[in-house]
């Protein structure tokens, strides 16, 4: 089933490098996402908590073919969505630096020729939320309207296929060195479960987690309240198109009302010196105003009804959702 953006929110989502999967009701990153040009550094993870992302980060560094590779896993709460990611990166400067310096280096996103076949299943307390699979450099999935207070409730069943057994073995060593139990998949694949991170986590997370998760929980509650008011059954960004129509109608009515008011005032002024002509003009304006009155009343009634039903939390959730994608804020590009 092909999905195409039709609403303002949907176009913002696509512009931010993502798309929507109707089958699983999730948002995911596109292969040609603009973030590919931004690369990766640990500083991006340090910036995640201030951007309302409380996520577990687990990077694996390993040498292969004279270069330092890094595959990182993420899972957790991304604002109003629960999600997970696998990213593949490489430092072409070589492996001359000491291993403890790997975290401080800058990595480029791999090119299309170095993309890997990857898959993962994200579970919360053992229950599957969604799964992703494909050849990619940044395989992701995000479920809007789902709040996970404790990231340790989330697990990722990860499977990665490598082009050569030598590369698989190098990565497997990095995984096993952190205490993970691995199993082979095919001739050159590996599988393991990401449950809790072994790598020290970003320092900002410890200081901000409580306040950020309180905000995220309120955001999720508001988003789900908005869906209920609008009778939206899924997370399709196109489902919010009715808000676009309401805003456009309000803008049209407002412009028309100002136009009528302007001509009415002009007609009243001309009435002093050109009574006959002004009367005719004012009559025409009044006729237009009368025709606009039902539309204005209907739009005002619809806006009033929506405002009475939508809580401040719901309104804030939608505004923040739009702002998030409109500004292309993302934890791997925001430092």
Image (cartoon, rainbow, N blue to C red):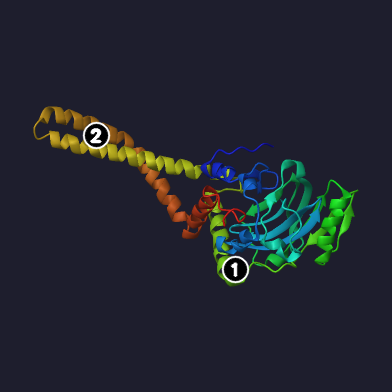
Q: Nearer the viewer, mark 2 or mark 1?
A: 1
In terms of image quadrants, where is residue 269? Answer: top left
- In this picture, residue 35 sits left or right of residue 229: right
Residue 232 visible (yes or no): yes
Q: Residue pushed farthest left?
A: 273
Residue at image mark 2:
286
Side (left or right) of 74 relative to 210: right
* Dot 1 crowding, Cα within 10 Å, few <14, some 14–19, many 20+: some
Rendering quarter of residue 246: top left
Image location (x, y in percent) of residue 160:
81, 51
Q: Is residue 57 visible?
A: no
Name the residue rendered at 65%, 51% in the picture: 39
Q: x%, y% of residue 331?
A: 61, 56
Residue at left 63%, top 44%?
Answer: 33
First along the sequence among labels 2 and 1? 1
**Disc 2 on helix, strand or loop?**
helix
Which quarter shows the C terminus?
bottom right
Secondary structure state at the residue bearing disc 1: helix
State whether residue 61 is above or below residue 10.
Answer: below
Tag on residue 204?
Answer: 1
Calculate the distance from the C-alpha at mark 2 to the C-alpha at mark 1. Answer: 62 Å
Closer to the camera, 139 or 19? 139
Q: Which residue is nearer to you in this view: 123 or 264?
A: 123
Residue at the front extreme of this rendering: 96
Q: Which mark is residue 121?
A: none
For this rendering, which residue is in front, 18 or 177?
A: 177
Which x, y percent locates residue 196?
A: 74, 66
- The 10 Å Cα crowd at callout 2, few under 14, some 14 to 19, many 20 or more, is some
List x then y, in percent, for residue 280: 18, 28
* Quadrant housing the N terminus: top right
């Amino acid at each position: 089933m092909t999905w195409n953006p039709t609403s303002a929110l949907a176009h913002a989502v696509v512009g931010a490098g993502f798309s929507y999967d109707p089958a699983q009701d999730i948002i995911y990153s596109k292969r040609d996402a603009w973030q590919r040009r931004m690369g990766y550094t640990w500083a991006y993870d340090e910036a995640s908590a201030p951007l309302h992302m409380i996520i577990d980060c687990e990077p694996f560094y390993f040498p292969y073919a004279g270069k330092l590779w890094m595959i990182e896993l993420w899972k957790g709460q991304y604002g109003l969505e629960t999600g997970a990611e696998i990213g593949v990166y490489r430092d072409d400067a070589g492996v001359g630096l000491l291993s403890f310096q790997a975290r401080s280096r800058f990595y480029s996103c791999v090119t299309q020729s170095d993309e890997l076949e990857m898959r993962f299943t994200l579970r919360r307390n053992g229950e599957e939320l969604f799964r992703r699979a494909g050849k990619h450099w940044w395989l992701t999935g995000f479920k809007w309207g789902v709040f996970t207070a404790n990231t340790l409730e989330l697990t990722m069943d990860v499977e990665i296929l490598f082009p050569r057994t030598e590369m698989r073995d190098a990565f497997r060593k990095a995984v096993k060195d952190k205490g993970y139990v691995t199993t082979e998949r095919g001739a050159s694949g590996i599988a393991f479960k990401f449950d809790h991170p072994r790598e020290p986590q970003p320092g900002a997370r410890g200081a901000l987690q409580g306040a950020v998760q309180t905000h995220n929980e309120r955001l999720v509650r508001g988003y789900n309240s908005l869906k209920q008011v609008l009778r939206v059954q899924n997370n399709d960004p196109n489902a919010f198109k009715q808000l676009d129509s309401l805003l456009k109608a309000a803008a049209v009515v407002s412009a028309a009302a100002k136009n009528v008011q302007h001509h009415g005032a002009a007609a009243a002024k001309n009435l002093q010196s050109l009574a006959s002509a002004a009367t005719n003009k004012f009559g025409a304006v009044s006729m237009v105003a009368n025709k606009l009155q039902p539309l204005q009343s209907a739009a005002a009634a619809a806006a009033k009804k929506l405002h009475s039903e939508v809580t401040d939390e719901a309104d804030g959730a939608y505004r923040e959702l739009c702002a998030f994608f409109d500004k292309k804020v993302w934890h791997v590009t925001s430092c």
